[in-house]
Image: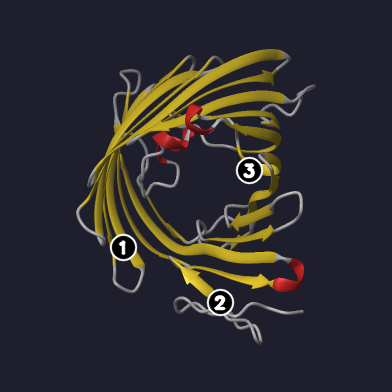
């Protein structure tokens, strides 16, 4: 088996006769005899959070379960490139109840991609990434206004060049466990200069009834500042909207201000705001601090104050 030898950086896998190419802490190597490029990536992250609740018990937690690892391949064939992507983190079922309990791996992604087709578990066609603001909070706005899910699916993306991209997919959201048919989804995405946006819709089955949700995301780049917005209207339960601004002061320091409003059909409405500052050292380690406040509506009329500190190294 002949391996291509190339070094561009300092990341080297401990494999005999394999020299790694490194870019932004991602490593890859090529197996010439298989026409295949193999890449690894991920990050190690420590998170510490202190939650001060005006109603209820305060809480403190520290963990590294957001740490993740991924493996990708790209094989050149006469029919075009065939790509695969597999990723895991440690948000699987926890064995035990204390902070030192065993954390099990969880599959995030496992998909094969070819000629615009995607089969496997991957980001839902409904996901509108343009509105995904950066928070240290693992969930942030991705639980509501920018609803990101990883679903088992079969999807096809049609690329119309300057006219944008259209993605059609069938998925299993597995929300109720009693679905009798797949959940169809559609998304249109495009970009005009500094503005990128996407519009998405999905029908899904829940409790023998068909529900609809629609979403939109937008991102506007203005030099060192980036504006983002997200919106989701889910017929089953809620509608949510968010807005954010990211400011990049230099290659090492950036800050984010994020705000989200969530209104439930049945449940407690809330608003949440995040403010963070993230510093990347010269050797790649990122250190970040964040303050967020979650403000519940008049039914509860209370707030949660959350302070979080992260240390992260991507490879």
Which callout, 2 or 3, points at the residue further toward the start of the chain?
2
Report if the CB atoms under discs 2 and 3 are less than 8 Å apart: no
* Near-viewer residue (159 or 149): 159
Measured from the top left, where is residue 27 in percent x and y?
54, 70
Residue 285 sits in quarter? bottom left
The Cα atoms of the two marked residues, 2 and 3, are separated by 27 Å
Residue 146 sits in quarter? top left
Which callout, 1 or 3, points at the residue further toward the start of the chain?
3
Q: Is residue 289 left or right of residue 177?
A: left
Point 34% across, 35% down: residue: 193
Report if the CB atoms under discs 2 and 1 are less than 8 Å apart: no
Disc 2 is placed on an element classified as loop
- The N terminus is located in which quarter? bottom right
Point 41% across, 38% down: residue: 132
Disc 1 is placed on an element classified as strand
Mark in the foreground, 2 or 1: 2
Q: What residue did someone put label 1 on? A: 287
Res 122 label:
3
Q: What residue did someone put label 2 on? A: 20
- Of all residues, the one furthest to the left in this rendering is 249
Q: Is residue 191 left or right of residue 277?
A: right
Residue 152 sits in quarter? top right
Report if the CB atoms under discs 1 and 3 are less than 8 Å apart: no
Specify whether residue 294 is in view. no
* Near-viewer residue (97 or 157): 157
Which callout, 2 or 1, points at the residue further toward the start of the chain?
2
Point 50% across, 32% down: residue: 147
Q: Is residue 87 left or right of residue 311?
A: right
């Amino acid at each position: 088996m002949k391996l291509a030898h190339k070094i561009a950086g300092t990341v080297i896998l401990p494999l005999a006769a394999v020299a790694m190419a490194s870019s932004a802490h991602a490593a890859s190597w090529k197996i010439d005899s298989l026409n295949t490029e193999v890449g690894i990536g991920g990050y190690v992250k420590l998170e510490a959070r202190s939650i001060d609740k005006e109603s209820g018990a305060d809480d403190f937690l520290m963990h590294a379960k957001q740490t993740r690892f991924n493996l990708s391949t790209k094989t050149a064939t006469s029919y075009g490139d065939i790509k695969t992507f597999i990723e895991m983190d440690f948000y699987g079922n926890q064995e035990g109840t204390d902070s030192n309990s065993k954390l099990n791996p969880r599959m995030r992604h496992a998909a094969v991609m070819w000629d615009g087709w995607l089969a496997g578990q991957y980001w839902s066609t409904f996901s509108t990434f343009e509105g995904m603001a950066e928070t240290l909070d693992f969930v942030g706005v991705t639980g509501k206004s920018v609803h990101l899910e990883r679903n088992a699916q079969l999807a096809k993306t049609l690329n119309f060049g300057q006219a944008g991209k259209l993605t059609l997919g069938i998925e299993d959201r597995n929300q109720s466990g009693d679905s009798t048919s797949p959940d169809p989804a559609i998304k249109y995405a495009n970009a005009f200069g500094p503005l990128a946006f996407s519009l998405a819709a999905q029908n899904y089955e829940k409790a023998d009834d068909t529900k609809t949700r629609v979403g939109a995301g937008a991102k506007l780049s203005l030099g060192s500042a980036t504006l983002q917005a997200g919106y989701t209207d889910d017929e089953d339960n809620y509608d949510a909207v968010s807005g954010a601004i990211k400011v990049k002061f230099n290659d090492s320091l950036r800050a984010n201000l994020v705000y989200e409003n969530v209104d439930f059909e049945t449940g407690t409405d809330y608003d949440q705001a995040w403010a963070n500052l993230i510093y990347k050292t010269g050797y790649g380690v990122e250190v970040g601090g964040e303050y967020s406040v979650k403000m519940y509506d008049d039914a509860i009329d209370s707030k949660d104050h959350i302070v979080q500190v992260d240390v992260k190294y991507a490879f």
